[in-house]
Amino acid sequence: MNKGSKLAMGIAAISLLLVGCGKAASSTSSKESSAALSGKVTAVGSTALQPLAAKAGSNFTAKNSKVNLTVQGGGSGTGLSQVQAGAVSIGDSDIFAEEKDGIKADKLTDHKVAVVGMAPVVNKDTGIKNLKMAQLKQIFTGKITNWKEVGGKDEKIVIINRAQGSGTRATFENAVLKGTDAVKSQEQDSNGAVQKIVSTTPGAVSYLAFSYFTNKLQAVSIDNVTPTDNNVETNKWKIWSYEHMYTKGTPDKATTAFLKYMDSKTVQDSLVKDMGYISIHDMKVTKDAKGVVTQN
């Protein structure tokens, strides 16, 4: 073997060694970076967002084992008040902070992580699959009290409302009641409770986030427009809201990393859709805190 060949082989060997060292260093650096992320993240609030936040949180901590991440419900009002007080890392909400009395929106930072469609739902025995918007308003204001008045079964209407402070209730009332007070009725704190009660109570009606639809109850169309993701994306379906994650001040590294993960393709293009939500990146319209909708 001549000197030139030996020199070339030596350079190649050194290059391979350096590449190997680079890969090892990169791998070590990546592991150290992942291991370095630690802390406690608590997200509290919207029960409409809770399933998505909980699943995303579980996936996030599986890759960041030193992060202690807790997701709890309690309603949008609770989430906003708790994050404003500095008691939690993230306040989950179906409504803008500007819409909630007592909340100083300018002191909070809004992170929109998904969109949720909401629709009226009824017990299957009512025989109702479609209502006019005016009829829906009359039902929830007590003007219509029997399903036969809107083409259904001769059966008393049993209204199940959401509790005051619920972002889902605020979204529904803004879109349907438009300033008119709802009739006094049974109130429930969560989507899960409403889902169970409507499906088992003859004549019951309420409203739910799309992600809580099951074959045990009937989702109702409005003015022959069906409650689907595509109709929400264009605002053809009017009852929808952003899912907000609010923070106060500068979030710590663990909270920042989780919020970044919520906006990642892994969550937006897969988990969000699989769990019945709509990616914020698929919306063809934008809605502001005053409810004004504009085309993107």
Image: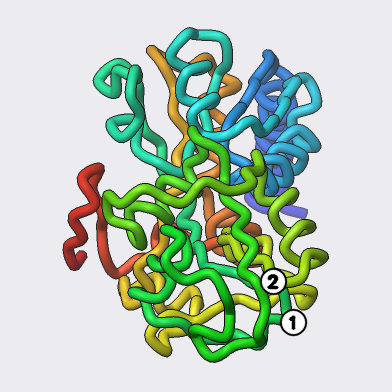
SS category of the residue bearing label 2: loop
Q: Earlier in the sequence, mark 1 or mark 2?
A: 1
Which quadrant of the figure contains the C terminus?
Answer: bottom left
Can you say whether 225 is above or below 184 in the image?
below
Asked if one can make out residue 15 in the rendered structure from this viewpoint, the answer is no
Q: Nearer the viewer, residue 249 or 223?
A: 223
The residue drawn where x is 73% and y is 50% is: 192
The residue drawn where x is 72% and y is 26% is: 70
Can you say whether 96 is above or below 84 in the image?
below
Mark 1 highlights which residue?
Answer: 125
Which quarter of the figure has residue 38? top right
Can you say whether 36 is above or below 202 in the image?
above
Left or right: where 226 falls relative to 87: left
Asked if one can make out residue 110 in the rendered structure from this viewpoint, the answer is yes
- Could you tell me residue 148's position as x and y percent? 57, 86
Residue type at mark 2? Gly
Mark 2 highlights which residue?
Answer: 203
Residues marked 1 and 2 touching at CB (< 8 Å) = yes
Q: Nearer the viewer, residue 286 or 227?
A: 227
Left or right: where 214 falls relative to 210: right
- Could you tell me residue 179's position as x and y percent? 27, 49
Left or right: where 102 falls relative to 2: left
The residue drawn where x is 47% and y is 18% is: 81
- Could you tell me residue 26's position as x and y percent? 66, 33
Q: Which mark is residue 96?
A: none
The crowd level at tag 2 (other Cα within 10 Å; few <14, some 14-19, many 20+) is many
Which quadrant of the figure contains the N terminus?
Answer: bottom right
Which quarter of the figure has residue 158? bottom right
Q: Nearer the viewer, residue 204 or 223?
A: 204
